[in-house]
Amino acid sequence: MALSEDTAGAFAPRSVVVTGGAGFIGSNLVRWLLEQEPALEVIVLDSLTYAGNLASLRSSARAHGPDGDGRFYFVHGDICDGAITAGLLAGGMAEPGTGRRLPTPDAILHLAAESHVDRSIIGPAAFVTTNVQGTLSLLESVRHELARAPRGFRVVNVSTDEVYGSLGPTDAAFTERHPLQPNSPYSASKAGADCLVRAYHETFGLPCITTRCSNNYGPYQYPEKLIPLMITRALGDQPLPVYGDGLNVRDWLHVRDHCAALWTVMTLGKPGDVFNIGGDCERRNVDIVKAILAALGKPESLIQFVRDRPGHDRRYAMDAGTLEQQLGWQPVERFEPALQATIEWYLSNRTWWESILREEHREWQDPYRLIDAR
């Protein structure tokens, strides 16, 4: 029996679960939601793997946790654990540590994922476990919960432009009609999750929407990704490793623009649809690195070209016209000033990222070296 309402129109959730809410995009989304939606309750579910950081949620917990207005909740758990997700969806579960009763959610923003391409090359199995099996487990929990207690509900599955593969230098940007052609274990696992989400909508009527975004940047990004990696290494006068010739092109999207897009899709999107989210901002990797060095007053001699990553996609570009035309979203951040603001954030928040670099998972800090050694 179909469970979803296949019509567009305003959907106004009162309580949402953000899976992976202690990660980079997730923690920014939690802050954005609590700031922009003053009546919304937000439950974070995160397993706190290496890229999940409770420090990224500190301001949200302080202002909106049990000592604030009470709209923020945190549950330490894995999306692969069906008992936890079932308990969250049913409502009334006690928040660990405080005993507060969790509200009954009517929406999920699903961001929990292993997301770093380099790590997926070194250890693909973890990506299949979290991204594919974890998404399957979550969908099953939603299916059983809505059969038990039918209600208005939405699931937004947050995916990536990488599922589309690679573009040539003059190819038109990806649209939602582009075939899925993933080239890395990471993108393959995300494509697998996307296909499951589609299948659960088509077969079981689950009210699911998928978004596919371009490269995000902004505060609280784990320092393995290009922009924070280059900032933190440049501040230490360390070599800046750039794959191949550095001419790979990415479309860049500020994380707050992404947050606004996700909420637009959640509240206005139609179940079953797919929306691309892009910043309309193509830049070559080496140009990003040079801009960071210039902003920090560091020499370009710090750039060190290293052997290219296996299966490295040459270019991504996103056509977000569907989202703009159907739902009215557009990015508002301009790249150059937003990049400068991001650099200034890392300068002002050394304690946050320096503590990460001191942690015991240092063997993952330099995936370039690990890949090159294989």
Image (cartoon, rainbow, N blue to C red):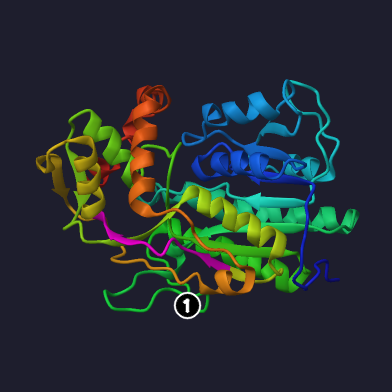
The residue at the point 34 percent across, 60 percent down is 250
Mark 1 crowd level (few <14, some 14–19, many ≥20, 10 Å Cα):
few
Vertical comparison of 97 with 224: above or below: above
Q: Is residue 106 left or right of residue 48?
A: right
Q: Position of residue 317 (x, y in %)?
A: 38, 68
* Residue at image point 80% right, 67% down: 4
Q: Position of residue 88 (x, y in %)?
A: 77, 41
In the depicted view, which residue is nearer to us: 275 or 200? 275
Frontmost residue, 238 versus 185: 238
Where residue 15 sits: x, y (%)? 77, 45
Q: Is residue 178 magenta?
A: no
Q: Is residue 220 left or right of residue 76?
A: left
The residue at which mark 1 appears reads as 178
Q: Is residue 103 visible?
A: yes
Q: Is residue 283 magenta?
A: yes
- Horizontal relation, residue 224 to residue 209: left or right: left
Q: In this view, does 32 lie above or below 344?
A: below
Q: Which quarter of the image is occupied by the N terminus? A: bottom right
Task: Locate residue 83, reporting x and y percent.
Answer: 76, 41
Q: Quadrant of residue 37?
A: top right
Q: Looking at the image, is 327 positioned above or below residue 227?
A: below
Out of 124 and 314, give the one closest to the viewer.
314
Q: Which region is colored magenta?
A: 275-285
Mark 1: secondary structure: loop
Residue 122 in view in this figure: no
